[in-house]
């Protein structure tokens, strides 16, 4: 686990940087360098905190992606989320290459702040909910968590994902790629609705929790 944490930073730099710089067809893309640094650093810090305080959660969170899902519908959803994320990076790179849009420095900084904030939310949620997993499943003896962020919205992890979606186009200096947010949010909402159907069927007390906490993703709105 320690080795995986150490190698996570350069690995993310390559995995996220490859589609971005290839689409931009240049390394002269300072917004991408800053984004990669912020995203990779936040990921490593998130992993190290969980490694120290919630190693079981970290192990479950590392089993992610379409192939990790047990149900076909979630494999489709996760494939859509993965493709959307890659398209985000590619479209941002193309935007930089062809100069389709210009984003002011303050917006780029704010975008990176949103990315860092999203990882803060991810970390806080994982520490509050020791049953947190990257796949739709129930852990042994799992119970409903209704404290902390879970007392505000039912899916705070996805609220953090929404912050990440909003932050990436700004951080990479691309307004055009923000159009993909509509698609990404639609897929995310599909995952939420399907997950709630699963939890209502299999997790005791979840219906009462839904009655208590009205909002799924955004306090006061949805």
Image (cartoon, rainbow, N blue to C red):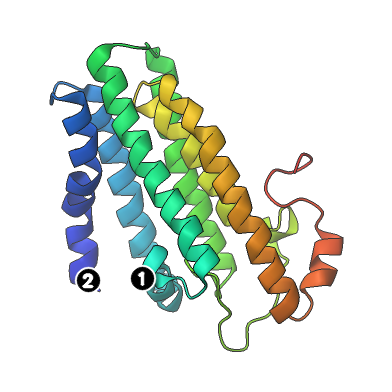
Residue 134 in the image, given as x and y percentages of width and height:
47, 66
**Left or right relative to 220: residue 68:** left
Q: What's the residue at 62%, 53% (across, down)?
A: 190
* Image vertical order of residue 194 relative to residue 95, above or below: below
- Picture quarter containing residue 34? top left
How packed mark 1 is, by other alpha carbons closer than 10 Å (few <14, some 14-19, many 20 or more), is some
Q: What's the residue at 20%, 23% (across, down)?
A: 29
* Image vertical order of residue 202 relative to residue 30, above or below: below
Q: Earlier in the sequence, mark 2 or mark 1?
A: 2
**Left or right relative to 72: residue 44:** left
Residue 210 in the image, given as x and y percentages of width and height:
80, 63
For numbered disc 1, what is the local secondary structure?
A: helix
Determine contact: label 2, label 1, CB under 8 Å. yes
**Left or right relative to 96: residue 173:** right
Location of mark 1 (residue) = 51
- Closer-to-camera residue (44/204): 204
Residue 67 in the image, given as x and y percentages of width and height:
37, 69
- Closer-to-camera residue (81/105): 81
* Image vertical order of residue 23 relative to residue 198, above or below: above
Residue 38 in the image, given as x and y percentages of width and height:
32, 39
Location of mark 2 (residue) = 2
**Left or right relative to 178: residue 21:** left
- Picture quarter containing residue 18? top left
- Asked if residue 186 shows in the view, the reply is yes
Count of labels in the image: 2
The C terminus lies in quadrant: top right
How packed mark 2 is, by other alpha carbons closer than 10 Å (few <14, some 14-19, many 20 or more), is few
For numbered disc 2, what is the local secondary structure?
A: helix
Q: Which mark is residue 213?
A: none
Mark 2–mark 1 Cα distance, whole angstroms, equals 9 Å
């Amino acid at each position: 686990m320690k080795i995986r944490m150490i190698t996570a930073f350069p690995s993310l730099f390559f995995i996220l940087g490859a589609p971005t710089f290839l689409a931009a067809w240049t390394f002269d893309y300072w917004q991408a360098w800053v984004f990669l640094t912020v995203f990779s650093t936040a990921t490593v810090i998130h992993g190290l905190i969980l490694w120290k305080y919630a190693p079981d959660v970290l192990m479950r969170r590392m089993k992610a992606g379409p192939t990790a899902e047990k149900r076909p519908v979630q494999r489709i959803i996760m494939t859509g989320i993965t493709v959307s994320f890659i398209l985000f990076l590619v479209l941002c790179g193309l935007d930089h290459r062809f100069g389709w849009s210009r984003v002011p420095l303050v917006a780029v900084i704010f975008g990176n702040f949103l990315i860092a904030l999203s990882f803060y939310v991810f970390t806080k949620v994982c520490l509050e909910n020791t049953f947190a997993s990257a796949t739709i499943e129930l852990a042994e003896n799992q119970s409903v968590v209704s404290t902390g962020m879970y007392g505000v919205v039912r899916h705070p992890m996805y609220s953090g994902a929404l912050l990440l979606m909003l932050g990436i186009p700004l951080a990479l200096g691309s307004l055009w790629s923000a159009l993909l947010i509509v698609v990404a949010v639609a897929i995310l909402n599909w995952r939420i609705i399907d997950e709630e159907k699963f939890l209502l069927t299999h997790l005791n007390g979840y219906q009462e929790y839904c009655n208590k906490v009205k909002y799924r993703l955004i306090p006061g709105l949805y």
